[in-house]
Image (tube, rainbow, N blue to C red):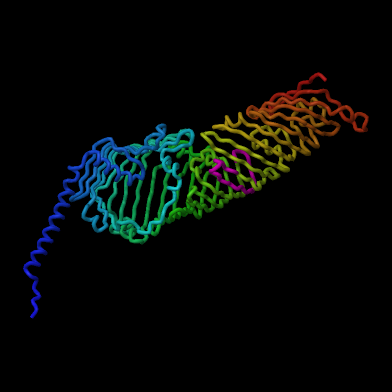
Amino acid sequence: MTDTMMSSSGAIAVRRMLFGLGGILSSIVLGLFLLPYLLPASVEKSIVSSVLEKAFQRPVIISGDVAFSVLPNILLSANNIVVPAAENTELPVLVDIASLQLEVGAVPLLSNVLDISRLSIDQPVFRFSRDQQGRTNWQAYQAANPVRAIRKPDFDWGWWHDLKIGDVRLNDGRLVFDDRLLRHKITGQNLVLRASISRITGADDGLSVDGGMDINGEAVRLQLDLGSMKRFLSGGRMPVIAELSAVPLTVRYQGTMAKRQYVVTEGQVSVDTPSVKRVEDWLGRVFARPVSGGLDWKFRFFANGNRTAFDDIRLEMGNGRYSGNLRLDAGSSGYRMDGVVSATNMDFGALSNVFSGIGWLDGVAGGVRLGWRKASFGDLKFDEGELRIALLPEKQRIELDLIRMAMYGGRASGLVKIVKREGMTSIDANVEVSRINSGNLLAGLRASASLMGDANIRLGLFSVGSSTEEMLAALRGNGEFNIIQGAVKSASLAEHLRVANRDALGFSQLIGSFSIDRGIVEGRDLLLKAEQLSLVGDGLVDLSSGEVNIHLQSLSRAREGSGKNIQKVRPFRMQGTLAEIEIFEEEG
């Protein structure tokens, strides 16, 4: 019979091997316990900094004490943590934290479970700043390397498959948003957030984050509820409910998230306020022109990796009603936006702030087609029209191609280029108008309707400045006009020329060309044809004050004896304002 029992020498060898492995494991465990005490302080700080840099995705500076241990739990603490903005010292620090403490279960990590027993972030200060040149402290690192904006697929779905939390909170935080470009500031105090396990979404192991802060003196509450994180990490859909609420404004999101090659998010977003003015009193200027009434904005939001979609947009703002769809795709050279938006009643004034503060469009190329049935800009009224908005970030330019627009009985078309550089905005416009009612147009411009008739106008304008006043003062350009079957409404002019109508001078045609320099319109080659009267002249109109100074005289006397009774008029000057003109005779 063969002896199957292990020989005594073999058993001794196995025992020696087991004792050896036990000694090695004991040495490893003892080393892990002693490691934090054996490492130099500089190495210890470097390890903690490296962990925090991965969390913030930015460089981190720790000026205070640090400590960490590995067993039985991974403990990490650091004081006086600073996340800088960039090398540019003119931009403020992005984040600084008085102290941070983190405790993670070491044994659960062996089974790919992230068990956060404790996370405490004390007295953090978040600073978001944009300077007068449009540079931001939160985009500085990304702007230096735009390729970082492109997300890569996560084929492994991450290494952890479950999340457990204990005491997780943020205490006594502050928030500062300082926009020097638009000259408004938002400050938040007493920021408190706490995370806990909940069943609000129906999942036994759901996660909730609850908290709030005081923003510009107004109490704001934040509530975020998530479904099962384990289900999400295994590829299932997780419900998401988020709400930020204050008395003037409420923002809600309800949808789902799933982890595929990218994190996929889909849901409904709503933004609601009963009064836009109340929000602007609270947060500062939002729109360049006052918007009456409230704002009700709803849309479906979809994000999958480098593609974001805004579908079924429904926006009611002031007197405006809008609908449409937008797409935003990230590429190696930046973002591209495409979409179509239509409006039943559009307020250009309310939307003008989009183009006056275009920081959010930096690096975004593409275009949007915008159509409307009715539109307004202040007191100006427009009928149906269509506009193509082209974004050209490499040229720092927005082009507005006015395909068509009906206004005051006529039509308009043209191209407007808006360039933003170093806090200054320049506008280059070429517009053509045909058969427009000049009297109604002047009334819409809040000018005295002193000129009547159907007008054809060609206009080229250029200006640059940091405000409306600066741009009006720097305005220059040129153009031509031709007005038929109209009248100059001026009793003093009618009386001076002794025409039958004592309130206005009727004419069959008024043509001329003009140039604009620093807001002053200089007319030349003016020709006015009326019954038994022909006048030529030139003059100036100040757009900012409405003052006029125009010289007129009879057409050449060579027509005398031609069979037409042409009235001879001594040279005279029209001086005053568009609302009130005085006549002064001159030598000649």
Rendering coords of residue 8 (x, y %) = 6, 68
Q: 201 and 82: which one is in front? A: 82
Residue 331 visible within the image: yes
When asked about the image quadrant of residue 547, the answer is: top right
Q: Compared to 572, does 564 lie above or below?
A: below
Q: Residue furthest left?
A: 8
Query: Which residue is depicted at the point 22% across and 39% down?
Result: 41
Residue 289 visible within the image: no
When asked about the image quadrant of residue 554, the answer is: top right
Q: 105 and 369: which one is in front? A: 105
Rendering coords of residue 25 (x, y %) = 16, 55
Please say whether residue 156 is one of the residues in the magenta stretch.
no
Q: Compared to 205, does 417 lie above or below?
A: above
Check the picture and name the quadrant holding the C terminus.
Answer: top right
Query: Which residue is depicted at the point 51% across and 38% down?
Result: 357
Q: Compared to 438, does 223 lie above or below?
A: below
Check the picture and name the quadrant holding the N terminus.
Answer: bottom left
Q: Is residue 106 left or right of residue 534?
A: left
Q: Residue furthest front?
A: 9
Q: Is residue 19 left or right of residue 508?
A: left
Q: Main secondary structure of the magenta part?
A: strand
Residues in magenta, as a range: 377-399
When asked about the image quadrant of residue 97, the answer is: top left
